[in-house]
Image (cartoon, grey):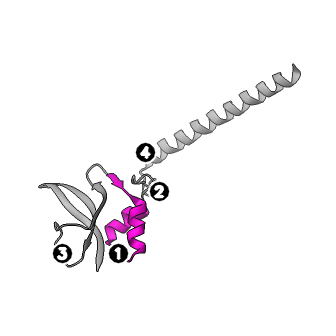
Amino acid sequence: MVKIRLKRLGNKKNPFYRIVVINSDQKREGAPLAELGTYNPKTKDMKLNKAAALDWVSKGAQPSDTVSYLIKNCDDEGKLIYKEKTEKKLSKKALAKLEAEKEAKAAEEAAAAEKTEEVVEAASEA
């Protein structure tokens, strides 16, 4: 059976992974059928050929749990997308900062809307 899994590279306590397609009976560092990308869990940097990965999955390759998560949460360019933290997990200080940012953004949008209305009114009078 063919699997899509991570091949560990890098130094001790500094992992770096290649996302590879490999036969399941071969060892982790064995010769892969194809290399689809790279993933660095320390910096959260990822490069993945998503089209090739989905093509291998359609051919019957089984992705590991981690690889399926990476495929699901990457954009079309192959970079990892992070979901914003929910408000339940944020501290009171972080919630206050988030509320202040939302209010500032709303004020900026209101000011921009008023400015465009003034420009439209001036243009219609002329």
Question: Disc 3 and disc 2: Cα gap in Å?
Answer: 41 Å
Q: Is residue 64 above or below residue 1?
A: above
- Indicate the amino acid at tag 3: Gln
Which class describes the residues within 10 Å of circle 2: few (<14), some (14-19), or many (20+)?
few
Which residue does the numbered mark 4 point to in the structure image? 93
- Indicate the amino acid at tag 1: Ala
Say if mark 3 contacts mark 1, CB within 8 Å.
no
> Is residue 113 located in the magenta-colored stretch of the structure?
no
Of mark 3 and mark 4, the one earlier in the sequence is: 3
Residue at point 77% right, 25% down? 119
- Indicate the amino acid at tag 2: Thr
Q: In the drawing, does residue 21 fall left or right of residue 49?
A: left
Q: Is residue 33 above or below residue 47?
A: below
Question: Disc 2 and disc 4: Cα gap in Å?
Answer: 14 Å
Residue 17's spot in the image, x, y percent? 24, 58
Q: Quadrant of residue 112?
A: top right
Which class describes the residues within 10 Å of circle 4: few (<14), some (14-19), or many (20+)?
few
- Indicate the amino acid at tag 4: Lys
Question: Disc 3 and disc 4: Cα gap in Å?
Answer: 50 Å
Which residue does the numbered mark 2 point to in the structure image? 86
Quick one: 10 or 51, which is closer to the camera? 51
Q: Which region is colored magenta?
A: 45-72
Secondary element at image label 2: loop
Which residue does the numbered mark 1 point to in the structure image? 61
